[in-house]
Image: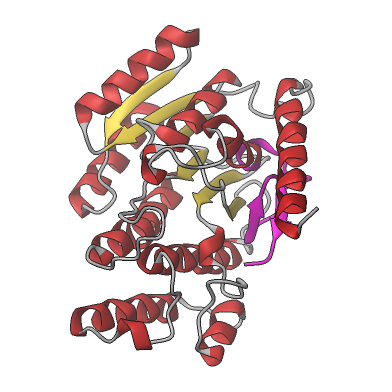
C-alpha cells in the first residue's frame, strides 16, 4: 500500500469516527447552553459549510443567526432550516467587507438578542479551482477572508455576553494557511518565525504581510516574493486568519472568569461545495463537525488560540 493510499485509509477511518461521534447526544451536564437562550452567529451561512454549521448548531437547540450578502439567498436558507426541524433560526444581511453593514448588523444583534454567545466566521471566497493559481482577485480574497473576519470579530467582541462557560469565536480556515506547512509554506524564514512566535505576533505584522503580498500582485513581482505557490491568494488570506486567531486569543486570555472568550480556527478539509466546484472529498456534514464541536465544548475542556482539523489540534 502506498503512502497516499495509507493516508486515504486513515482519513476515511477518522471520518467514520467523527460521523459516529455526531450520533451520540450531548448529556445534560455537557449541554451548558440548555438553561439559557444561547445565540450563535454564523457568517456566510446561506449555503455550503456555513449552512451546515448553522443547521447542526440549531439541531442542538441554539438560536442561530444566519448571515449572507444576498437577502433572498439568506431568507431561502432560513426557510429551509425551519421546515427541516422547526429550528430557531433567524437571518440578517451582512457583508463582512462593508463597514456600514457590519455596524448595522451589530446594532441589530444588540437590539434583537442583547448580544451573542458564539461567532463562527465562515464567510469567505476562493476563485481558483483544481490546479488554477490566478491572483486576479487577490484583493477581494484577502479583503473578504482576512479583513472581513478580523473586522467582524472586532465588532462582535463587545457584544459577546458574559457566561460561566465563556463565549466562543470559531474561524473557518485552511491547512493551506499553515506557516510551516510542508507543501505551501512561506519562503521567508524570518517572516515565518515572526508569524509563529506569539511574542512577536501583532496585528501590524499580519496586516503588513498581506499588504506586501497585494502590492507585489499589483506590480507583478509576487511569483518571486516567496509566497505559497498553490492557491496563493487564498493561502495568504488563511495564513493571516490563523495568525490573527492566535493573536486575538492571547489578548483575550487575560479576561476574568465569566468573561472569557475562547478563539480557535479549524480546517474543514476539501469539501464538496460550490467553492471547490463540488470536487472535494468530504461532505459538508463531516466538514462542519469540528466547528460545531469547538462552539459547544465545555469550558473545562476548551482551549484557545489553537488550530484544529477533524477534532484534533494541528500545528499552525
Q: Decide which of 176, 153 is in the foreground and name it.
A: 176
Would residue 5 be found to the left or right of residue 232 on screen?
Answer: right
Asked if the magenta segment contains residue 298, the reply would be yes
Q: How does the figure colour the protein chain or chains?
A: secondary structure
Is the residue 199 above or below the residue 39 in the image? below
Q: Decide which of 267, 302 is in the foreground and name it.
A: 267
Q: Residue furthest bottom?
A: 190
Q: Which residues are magenta?
A: 294-316
Q: Residue at x 27, y 87 (%)?
A: 221
Would residue 207 be found to the left or right of residue 28 on screen?
Answer: left
Does the image show residue 285?
yes
Q: Decide which of 247, 78 is in the foreground and name it.
A: 78
Q: Position of residue 215 (x, y in %)?
A: 25, 82
Would residue 139 be found to the left or right of residue 24 on screen?
Answer: left
Q: Residue at x 56, y 74 (%)?
A: 179
Is the residue 74 above or below the residue 116 in the image? above
Q: Position of residue 171 (x, y in %)?
A: 50, 51
Image quarter of the C terminus: bottom right
Is the residue 204 above or below the residue 124 in the image? below
Q: Quadrant of residue 253?
A: bottom right
Q: Decide which of 199, 159 is in the foreground and name it.
A: 199
Q: Residue furthest front?
A: 1
Does the image show residue 200?
no
Q: Quadrant of residue 237?
A: bottom left
Asked if the magenta segment contains residue 228, the reply would be no
Q: Residue at x 54, y 92 (%)?
A: 190
Q: Position of residue 267 (x, y in %)?
A: 57, 52
Q: Residue at x 48, y 37 (%)?
A: 272
- Labels in figure, total: 0
Amino acid at each position: 500500500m502506498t503512502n497516499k493510499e495509507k493516508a486515504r485509509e486513515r482519513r476515511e477511518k477518522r471520518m467514520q469516527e467523527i460521523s459516529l461521534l455526531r450520533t451520540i447526544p450531548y448529556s445534560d451536564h455537557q449541554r451548558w447552553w440548555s438553561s439559557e437562550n444561547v445565540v450563535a452567529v454564523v457568517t456566510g451561512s446561506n449555503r455550503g459549510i456555513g449552512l451546515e454549521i448553522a443547521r447542526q448548531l440549531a439541531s442542538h437547540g441554539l438560536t442561530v443567526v444566519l448571515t449572507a450578502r444576498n437577502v433572498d439567498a439568506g431568507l431561502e436558507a432560513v426557510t429551509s432550516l425551519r421546515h427541516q426541524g422547526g429550528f430557531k433560526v433567524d437571518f440578517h444581511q451582512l457583508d463582512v467587507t462593508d463597514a456600514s453593514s457590519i455596524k448595522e448588523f451589530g446594532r441589530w444583534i444588540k437590539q434583537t438578542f442583547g448580544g451573542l454567545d458564539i461567532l463562527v466566521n465562515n464567510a469567505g471566497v476562493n476563485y481558483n479551482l483544481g490546479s488554477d493559481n490566478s491572483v486576479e482577485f487577490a484583493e477581494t480574497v484577502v479583503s473578504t477572508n482576512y479583513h472581513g473576519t478580523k473586522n467582524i470579530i472586532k465588532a462582535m467582541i463587545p457584544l459577546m455576553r458574559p457566561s460561566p462557560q465563556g463565549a466562543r469565536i470559531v474561524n473557518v480556515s485552511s491547512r493551506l494557511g499553515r506557516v510551516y506547512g510542508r507543501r505551501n509554506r512561506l519562503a521567508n524564514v524570518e517572516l515565518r518565525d515572526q508569524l509563529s512566535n506569539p511574542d512577536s505576533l501583532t496585528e501590524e505584522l499580519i496586516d503588513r504581510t498581506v499588504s506586501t503580498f497585494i502590492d507585489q500582485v499589483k506590480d507583478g513581482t509576487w511569483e518571486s516574493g516567496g509566497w505559497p505557490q498553490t492557491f496563493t491568494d487564498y493561502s495568504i488570506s488563511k495564513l493571516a486568519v490563523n495568525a490573527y486567531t492566535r493573536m486575538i486569543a492571547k489578548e483575550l486570555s487575560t479576561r476574568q472568569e465569566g468573561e472569557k472568550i475562547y478563539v480557535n480556527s479549524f480546517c474543514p478539509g476539501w469539501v464538496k461545495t460550490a467553492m471547490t466546484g463540488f470536487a472535494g472529498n468530504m461532505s459538508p456534514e463531516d466538514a462542519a463537525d469540528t466547528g460545531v464541536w469547538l462552539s459547544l465544548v465545555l469550558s473545562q475542556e476548551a482551549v484557545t488560540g489553537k488550530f484544529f482539523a477533524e477534532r484534533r489540534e494541528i500545528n499552525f
